[in-house]
Amino acid sequence: FFSYEGTDGVLNDVSFTVPKGRITAVVGLSGEGKTTIANLLLRFYDPTSGSVEIDGVDIRKASLKSLRGQIGIVTQEVVLFNDTIRNNIAYGNEEATDDAIMSAAAAAQVDQFANSLQEGYDTVLGEEAARLSRGQRQRIAIARAVVRDPAILILDEATSSLDAHHSSMFFEALSGFMRERATILISHQLSHVSKADQILVLTQGRVTARGTHKELLANCDFYSNLYRKQEVSGHGEG
């Protein structure tokens, strides 16, 4: 259970396990508490009651540095620095080798646009950053998280700028990396979570349904109706 001071519960009786090597998606409308789950895992807040555990140990027993060193997170708000693409990626792990940086870039599909730039990975993202699409900026941020080699990867609306086709391509490229750690995928776009091993549906701060994409389409009216609505409306960019 979690509530901000002076408010009703944001999360109520939420309990789930994120196994290593599996992708767990958390979906729901805006304001349902999806990002709050990530904030609790990073200890920006502590649960009002209950606990968050990693390998059976309450995260409050670990130092913040140790805890956050195990976690890579990408949000929809991307911060890029006035530096090269290479150094923007390496910011996630300043000890990363060039091979590790290139591997992370390939996993996040940064190479698809960086190699077409005149200076390649040595392109300085000053004014150039404004010329990148939002999706390209997000890919750099994802590469930054990948190069950290975290035990836990959190993607909080990290592919919100990609359409369903590009999102599918992205997750296919990143699937090997995600299968080697525990991954939490937070999104309101259901087409982006269809490959997850388990999907949790949050409604008014509670997990009201869980299952695979196929199972939820068949058994959860909220999920199936929202999925069809999004399919009709379309969204995202390349």
Image: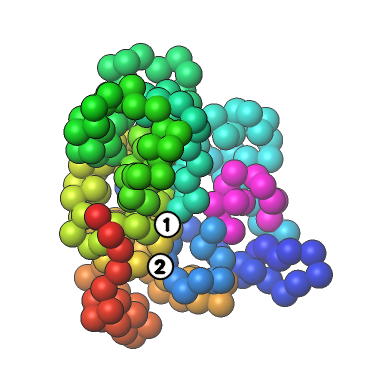
Residue 182 seen anywhere in this rendered image of the structure: no
Q: Does 37 lie within the magenta span?
A: yes
| 46 displayed left or right of 115 | right
Give coordinates of residue 159: x percent, y percent: 35, 54
Please report whichever mark, 2 or 1, sits nearer to the chain's N-terminal start.
1
- Element marked by disc 1: loop
Residue 132 location, x and y as percent?
Answer: 34, 44
Stretch of the chain drawn in magenta: 36-47
Quick one: 112 or 177, which is closer to the camera? 112
- Which residue: 54% across, 29% down? 69
Q: Which residue is mark 1?
A: 157
As shown in the figure, which amino acid type bears the numbered disc 1?
Glu
Residue 178 lies in the magenta-colored region: no
Asked if marks 2 and 1 touch (Cβ < 8 Å), the reply is: yes
Check the picture and name the quadrant holding the N terminus: bottom right
Residues 5 and 90: in front is: 90
- Image mark count: 2
Q: For the C terminus, which image quadrant? A: bottom left
Q: Which mark is residue 188?
A: 2
Q: Position of residue 48 (x, y in %)?
A: 73, 59
Q: Which residue is painted at 27% across and 66% down in the image?
A: 191
Q: Does residue 94 appear in this view? A: yes
Q: Position of residue 137 (x, y in %)?
A: 38, 44
What amino acid type is highlighted by mark number 2? His
Q: Quadrant of residue 226?
A: bottom left
**Vertical relation: 206 (above or below) 183:** below
**Residue at 67% in and 30% down:** 63
Crowding at label 2, few (<14), some or many (≥20) Cα neighbours within 10 Å? many
